[in-house]
Image (cartoon, rainbow, N blue to C red):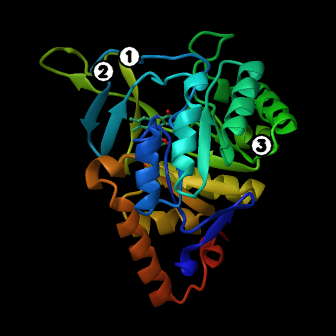
Amino acid sequence: MSLLKTEVAGIYFENPLILASGILDENGYTMKKILQEGAAGVVTKSIGTVERTGYRPPIVAEVTGGLLNAVGLPNPGIDSFGEEIKVALEAGKPVIGSIFGGGVQEFVDLAIKMEGYGANAIELNLSCPHVKGVGSEVGSDPALVTDIVTEIKKRVKIPVFAKLSPNVTDMLEIAIAAEAADALVMINTVRGLAIDVYARKPVLSNTYGGLSGKAIKNIGLRYVYEVKMETGKEIIGVGGIENAEDAIEYIMAGSSAVQLGTVLYKKGRQAFAEISSGITQFMKSEGFGSIKEMVGAALP
Ligand SMILES: Cc1cc2nc3c(=O)[nH]c(=O)nc-3n(C[C@H](O)[C@H](O)[C@H](O)COP(=O)(O)O)c2cc1C
């Protein structure tokens, strides 16, 4: 077990595998079960200020190499989420509270409440609609990203992770803008579209969706590698990890830990145990004594 332990911003994880935001993590009991069955940590569903029901179906489509989803950030609202965090924390492992908002003050208020509930870190979902400017995203505005991260860092004591969206012209610029964050999480889903040719219309009710799964792995790897090389910041890699080798690729590109999302739909919760054991086998056969030795091993 100790071979797999890792650390991100002073938080210890017994292995490098964390549940990604949005998958089986709106409920405290499910999060607790996933932690008890092998995940080293969980990120909650992204939580906003008020309850949202999300978009009408269809909200998820199976596409080549993964899933296309536009669930519309359904969540119970921050004021009803304390109990879920409390239950998840009973597993005795790190629980990371994901939040989304439309501006600086909303993010700050949510972060303070998450910290109050006992979350071990905050993950900022910077990929949601921006109040000023229709169709834009909070995470594509570098000045706004800097303001959100800097203000939250002044107001909470727990580590703050900034989750970046690949749907920007220059992710490196946004990574640099998030300088005050303790770690970066990359990547969120890649904007895409699927069409039902018989109905002659887009499959999802929202038209566009976010692509996840195997199809985005090499996009995520490229961003992790590039941002690690240019900024040296601590990174949690996510996007298309389905097996131990995928996770090791992300670690060698510069991730100190990784998150699993879409693979849970394919392999179920046992994905954590299976990938952990594959990483252990690889480390033993390749002579790695710790995850730390592998982090960034592929960088020049
Ligand atoms: C159904 C679904 C819901 C998601 N909801 C969220 C969310 O609420 N907040 C967030 O930051 N990311 C969300 N994501 C993105 C994932 O956390 C992850 O960044 C992305 O799916 C890439 O990883 P994967 O290929 O392992 O799924 C969601 C993904 C899926 C498939």
Q: Identify the disc placed on residue 204.
A: 2
Q: Identify the disc placed on residue 176.
A: 3
For the residues labelled 1 and 2, the Cα–Cα distance comes to 9 Å
Which one is closest to the eye, mark 3 or mark 1?
A: 1
Residue 226 x/y as whole percent: 65, 54
Which one is closest to the eye, mark 1 or mark 2?
A: 1
Residue 39 seen by the camera: yes
3 or 2: tag closer to the N-terminus: 3
Please state, as top left, top right, bottom left or bottom right, where the C terminus lies in the image.
bottom right
Residue type at tag 1: Tyr
Which of the 4 image quadrants contains residue 9?
bottom right
Which of the 4 image quadrants contains residue 282?
bottom left
Left or right of 167 in this view: 194? left
Residue 240 seen by the camera: no
3 or 1: tag closer to the N-terminus: 1
Q: Is mark 2 within 8 Å of ligand 1?
A: no
Residue type at tag 2: Leu
Name the residue rendered at 40%, 37% in the picture: 211
For the residues labelled 3 and 1, the Cα–Cα distance comes to 33 Å
1 or 2: tag closer to the N-terminus: 1
In front of the other: 265 or 94: 94
Q: Identify the disc placed on residue 55.
A: 1
From the viewer's perspective, is residue 292 above or below residue 62?
Answer: below
From the viewer's perspective, is residue 103 above or below residue 19?
Answer: above
Q: Identify the disc placed on residue 211.
A: none
How many other residues sit within 10 Å of disc 2, few (<14), some (14-19) or many (≥20)?
A: many
Left or right of 88 in this view: 226? right
